Image (spheres, rainbow, N blue to C red):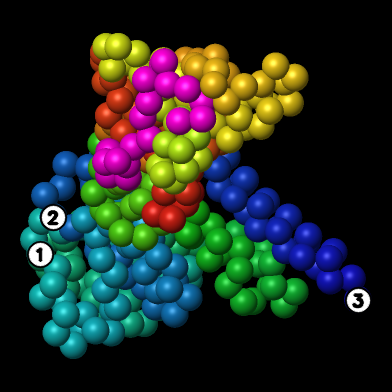
């Protein structure tokens, strides 16, 4: 049995479902965005079984991208949690058949309180669709399951529609990286979008020498500084160069090498630096990787040293 071909068939089948949905998406989607954006309440997602699992993911995505949202199981709603839905809230109900019994039971109660309802189902004539103010058709031609029964293509499409809605709402609200960071202060995402260069700067006991310093003395400072580099400044305390291990090794290959030469004579002049200490640390790491360096100098507007950012500090902080 060719399992690789089976995997390809599944992916092609689900990709086709997404492509057809993209071609057929209509005004209902825009209506949903315009309904949700000005709402002062929450967007509550509900569904049963696989639709419920997908709905929980959609709610999490919405909540992390600026739309106040949570998942409510319809059975729990019928046993007291219906009170969690406020008059200013909007409900997004998911049921592929549009006839899930537990979900259908709460619909009259939603209408009684005049709660706007967005529905995702395959049948525009289903009970769920008939109750809905806005209807998303998530019908697929074929499930990826060989029996055409297990929710596969349909759940993929449903999740993708939720992602599309979340992204459209982000665009509508002009949701930026900084906004995203405030929702993800921890974990790798938060570190990428929240930690600034200034948070990781080394500012104390830096290996700094003047331009007249002899190489042999600069090497001592390099060893004590534990950065593998020496920062060179001029008489006005402006950074003019950087001596690295690599510079030192290259100098050793010169037949005229002398430990009594000035450190400036073998250093890298005008080293890579940045003047925005509030830059995201993840962007600074990208600079370091693009320049193929280990140490980035952070300067003020007068070219004076504020601190150093070492690639090891970024990695240890979990910046990727």
Q: Residue at x 62, y 22 (%)?
A: 258
Label placed on residue 86: 1
Reading the image, the residue beneath label 2 is 41
Q: What is the secondary structure assignment of the residue under circle 2?
A: loop
Reading the image, the residue beneath label 3 is 1
Q: Residue at x 42, y 21 (%)?
A: 213
Q: CA distance from mark 3 to mark 2?
A: 52 Å
Q: What is the secondary structure assignment of the residue under circle 1?
A: loop
Q: Residue at x 65, y 67 (%)?
A: 143
Dot placed on the residue nearer the N-terminal end, 3 or 2: 3
Residue 94 in view in this figure: no
Q: Position of residue 247 (x, y in %)?
A: 60, 27
Relative to the observer, which residue lies in front, 296 or 166?
A: 296
User: Residue 209 appears in which quarter of the rendering?
Assistant: top left
Q: Nearer the viewer, mark 3 or mark 2?
A: 3
Mark 2: few/some/many CA within 10 Å (<14, 14-19, 20+) = some
Quadrant of image for the N terminus: bottom right
Inspect the magenta stretch and tell me whether residue 202 lies in it. yes
Magenta stretch bounds: 196-217
| Marks 2 and 1 in Cβ contact (< 8 Å) | yes
Dot placed on the residue nearer the N-terminal end, 2 or 1: 2
Q: CA distance from mark 1 to mark 3?
A: 54 Å
Q: What is the secondary structure assignment of the residue under circle 3?
A: loop
Q: Position of residue 51 (x, y in %)?
A: 44, 71
Direction from residue 223 to residue 195 in the image, left or right: left
């Amino acid at each position: 049995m060719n399992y690789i071909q089976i995997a390809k068939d599944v992916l092609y089948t689900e990709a086709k479902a997404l492509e057809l949905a993209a071609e057929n998406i209509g005004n209902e989607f825009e209506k949903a965005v315009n309904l949700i954006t000005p709402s002062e309440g929450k967007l509550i997602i509900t569904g049963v079984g696989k639709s419920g699992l997908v709905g929980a993911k959609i709610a999490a995505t919405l909540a992390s991208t600026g739309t106040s949202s949570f998942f409510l199981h319809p059975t729990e709603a019928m046993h007291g949690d219906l009170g969690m839905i406020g008059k200013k809230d909007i409900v997004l109900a998911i049921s592929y058949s549009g006839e899930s019994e537990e979900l259908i039971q709460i619909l009259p109660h939603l209408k009684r309180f005049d709660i706007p309802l967005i529905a995702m189902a395959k049948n525009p004539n289903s009970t769920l669709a008939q109750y809905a103010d806005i209807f998303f058709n998530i019908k697929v031609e074929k499930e990826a399951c060989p029996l055409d029964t297990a929710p596969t293509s349909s759940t993929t499409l449903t999740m993708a529609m939720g992602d599309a809605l979340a992204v459209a709402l982000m665009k509508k609200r002009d949701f930026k990286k900084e906004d995203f960071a405030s929702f993800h202060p921890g974990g790798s995402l938060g570190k990428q979008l929240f930690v600034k260069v200034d948070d990781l700067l080394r500012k104390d006991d830096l290996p700094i020498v003047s331009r007249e310093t002899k190489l042999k003395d600069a090497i001592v400072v390099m060893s004590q500084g534990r950065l593998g580099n020496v920062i060179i400044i001029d008489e006005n305390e402006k950074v003019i160069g950087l001596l690295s291990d690599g510079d030192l090794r290259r100098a050793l290959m010169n037949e005229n090498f002398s430990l009594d030469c000035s450190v400036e004579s073998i250093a890298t002049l005008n080293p890579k630096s940045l003047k925005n200490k509030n830059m995201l640390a993840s962007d600074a790491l990208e600079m370091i990787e693009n320049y193929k360096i280990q140490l980035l100098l952070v300067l003020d507007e007068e070219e004076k040293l504020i601190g150093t950012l070492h690639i090891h500090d970024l990695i240890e902080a979990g910046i990727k």
